[in-house]
Amino acid sequence: MTRRKLFIPGPTEVRPEILAAMATPLIGHRGAECRDLVRRIVEKLRPVFGTQGLALFETCPATALMEASMRNLVHERALVLTCGAFSERWHEIALACGKEADALPVEWGKPNRADELGEVLRSRRYDVVTITHNETSTGVLNPLRELAAVARKHDCLVLVDAVSSLGGAPIDFDANGLDFCFAGTQKCLAVPPGLTVFALSTRAVERAARQKHRGWMFDFVRAAKSFEKFETLATPSLSHLFALDAQLDAILKETLPARFARHRAMAERVWSWAEERGLEMFSEAGFRSPSISCIRLGPHAPETLANRAKAAGFVLGDGYGQAKTTTFRIGHMGDHDLASVGALLAALDG
């Protein structure tokens, strides 16, 4: 099979060294070696989230943590901020879990607004507010700090989907007063898909402890107690843990500020390229993602750009959801750099 470099919105490219780490011989998941591995990962995840508190992981897709948040943290009602396909999924999951949930939507390509959130919270009581930090379908980066501050003012737990932003943009879990935040490893962290990392506040664990029917595998109280001993609830994907351990070392060696700056520089390079060619960004200026660019197709047929990328050895992302036929997406995240982004853009020029 011909190998092509991934510039889709995830999974992203994984360095050979990280893939090689997955071939590390297995260890017992209840032994001292595994507890030390879990401890190392937890300690290195904390600065990535920006927390001094609980940083955890589970062997599952990130969508499973959306469901876990509803089962653990919503007693009566959730307010779900929607701005694209994946934020809308959180609302669907809330309803599927039997929770009362209201959506606060904005037009696709637009960010959620703190003033609109405040207006809704003044009129009705909610247990939680869910925020999609980086909407993968539209390339919108929501104003996390402002939205979280409004939610906290109204005594709501703040739940955050950082699937395509963790490791590519600041989360500042503690400083922003967040209660739950999760992300898959296959995007800005640049590890193969299979793990979801998440952070929990003390408030969230206390709320979960008062909630009935949390389930077992994704019980936040049970998970918190287990990770205090650096143990997992069930057998984890050890191969993924070896990869995540190695990649976190690389991320912290690069430093988070440098990593954030690199993601921003790649994004700005794509934005400039689009502007120079008369192409319109789908996401609103001032709220554009550093990890995913969603661009209107303009005069191009989708297959034209895809074929140009393919011929040069790249895979381009197509549009998603209601923007599927009118946009294309470039995932510039993880360990990509300006040189590789430049090579892709040159290929798209034909």
Image (cartoon, grey):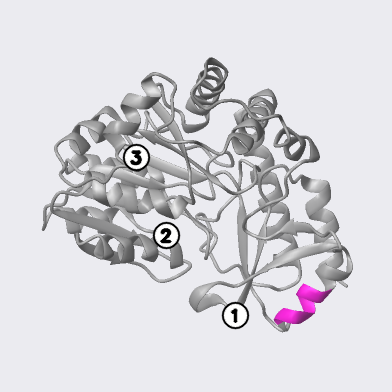
Asked if 108 appears above or below 143 in the picture, the reply is below
At horizontal 34% and vertical 56% (from top left) the residue drawn is 113
Residue 180, label in figure: 3
Q: Secondary structure at mark 1?
A: loop
Q: Is residue 279 left or right of residue 28?
A: right
Q: Which residues are magenta?
A: 302-307
Q: Secondary structure at mark 2?
A: loop
Mark 2 or mark 3, earlier in chain: 2
Name the spot of residue 107 as percent of width and height, x first.
40, 71
Front position among marks 3 and 1: 3
Q: Please state which amino acid type lies under the numbered disc 3.
A: Phe
Circle 2 residues within 10 Å: few <14, some 14–19, many ≥20: many
Circle 1 sits on which residue?
326
Q: Please state which amino acid type lies under the numbered disc 2.
A: Pro
Asked if 116 appears above or below 290 in the picture, the reply is below
Q: Quadrant of the N terminus?
A: bottom right
At horizontal 39% and vertical 18% (from top left) the residue drawn is 229
Q: Determine the CA span between mark 2 and mark 3.
A: 20 Å
Name the spot of residue 26 as percent of width and height, x first.
65, 30
Q: Is residue 322 left or right of residue 96?
A: right
Circle 1 residues within 10 Å: few <14, some 14–19, many ≥20: some
Circle 2 sits on which residue?
111
Q: Determine the CA span between mark 1 and mark 2.
A: 19 Å
Residue 346 picture quarter: bottom right
Contact check, label 2 and label 3, Cβ < 8 Å: no
At horizontal 52% and vertical 65% (from top left) the residue drawn is 138
- Most common SS among magenta residues: helix
Query: Between 43 and 126, which is closer to the camera in this rendering?
Result: 43
